[in-house]
């Protein structure tokens, strides 16, 4: 792990000085603000557009609808942004050859990979907190009787899912030199987990149930523990596999 500290500091400096900070914080902040507004005014917009042609009477929106809207975007579009940044952090450098110089100095390969992963994980947590915080403020302004616990619980569950998929994407980036390929593998696993989550036992006792647990938490329901535990274990195991692959890879 020689060189982990200096490498991590370098990663944070580069992150905040490049497009990545805007791609992550900017997009999360935008959806955090917009999602509660969409949830609050969608019934009124549909009623004004469709008028008497509206097939059913839409229920009055609540803060739980805003939480569901935000966590839905987190699980889909915003997860794609996170995985893109994770893939580019390693595969992008390998493709450009800029990883060679740092690794010829007293910087070990595990330190190189873990510094990049740590930066992505921390910045993802910050972005999720910023987006959720802004969304919480807007939700409090637009809805009555707001309970923010389901929202923040759902985001916590989502973060475990993000850890799993970041680990998969980074492990893929340790094996291939294409950012697009690493991103495709990471998002492909995301899709496969969603399909596997349709099977009851997998949904209840494995990381395949994390996406469903996000929705349950956003709706104010209880969250099963085993998908969370399994998610952390799988993320660690997959990242370890990526480190082994990267250590054996030619520079």
Image (spheres, grey):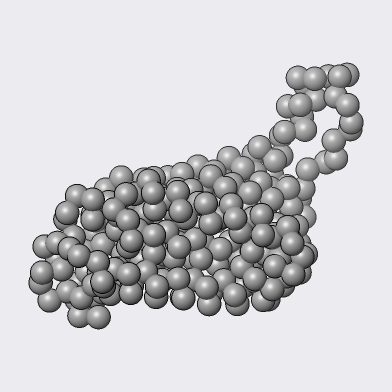
Q: How many marks?
A: 0
User: Residue, x 37% and y 69% (percent of image)?
Assistant: 242
Drawn side of residue 191 relative to residue 110, left or right = right
Residue 122: image location, x then y, percent: 40, 65
Residue 51, visible in the rendered structure? yes
Q: Residue 132 sits in which quadrant?
A: bottom right
Front-lying residue, 227 or 198: 198
Q: Residue 19 sits in which quadrant?
A: top left
Front-lying residue, 33 or 189: 189
Residue 155, visible in the rendered structure? no
Residue 15: image location, x then y, percent: 29, 55
For the N terminus, the quadrant is bottom left
For the C terminus, the quadrant is bottom left
Drawn side of residue 11 relative to residue 224, left or right = left
User: Residue, x 32% and y 69% (percent of image)?
Assistant: 245
| 226 w.r.t. 90: above or below | below
Residue 18: image location, x then y, percent: 26, 48
Q: Most extreme residue toward the bottom, as rendered?
A: 1
| 62 w.r.t. 57: above or below | below
User: Residue, x 49% and y 66% (percent of image)?
Assistant: 163
User: Residue, x 64% and y 39% (percent of image)?
Assistant: 37
Front-lying residue, 65 or 184: 184
Drawn side of residue 94 relative to residue 171, left or right = left
Front-lying residue, 80 or 169: 169
Residue 188: image location, x then y, percent: 52, 51
């Amino acid at each position: 792990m020689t060189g982990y500290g200096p490498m991590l500091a370098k990663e944070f400096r580069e992150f905040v000085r490049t497009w990545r900070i805007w791609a992550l914080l900017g997009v999360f902040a935008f959806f955090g603000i917009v999602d509660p507004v969409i949830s609050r005014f969608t019934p009124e917009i549909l009623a004004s557009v469709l008028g008497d042609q509206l097939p059913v009477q839409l229920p009055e929106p609540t803060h739980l609808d805003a939480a569901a809207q935000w966590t839905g975007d987190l699980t889909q579009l915003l997860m794609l942004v996170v995985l893109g940044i994770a893939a580019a952090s390693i595969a992008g450098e390998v493709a450009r050859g800029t990883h060679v110089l740092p690794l010829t100095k007293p910087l070990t390969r595990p330190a190189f990979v873990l510094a990049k992963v740590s930066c992505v994980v921390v910045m993802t947590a910050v972005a999720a907190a910023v987006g959720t915080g802004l969304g919480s403020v807007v939700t409090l302004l637009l809805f009555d009787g707001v309970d923010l616990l389901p929202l923040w619980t759902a985001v916590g569950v989502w973060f475990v899912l993000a850890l799993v998929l970041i680990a998969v994407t980074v492990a893929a980036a340790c094996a291939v030199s294409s950012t697009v390929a690493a991103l495709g593998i990471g998002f492909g696993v995301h899709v496969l987990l969603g399909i596997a989550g349709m099977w009851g036992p997998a949904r209840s006792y494995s990381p395949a149930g994390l996406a469903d647990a996000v929705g349950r938490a956003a709706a104010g329901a209880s969250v099963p523990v085993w998908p969370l535990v399994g998610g952390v274990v799988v993320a660690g195991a997959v990242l370890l596999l990526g480190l082994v692959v990267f250590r054996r890879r030619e520079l």
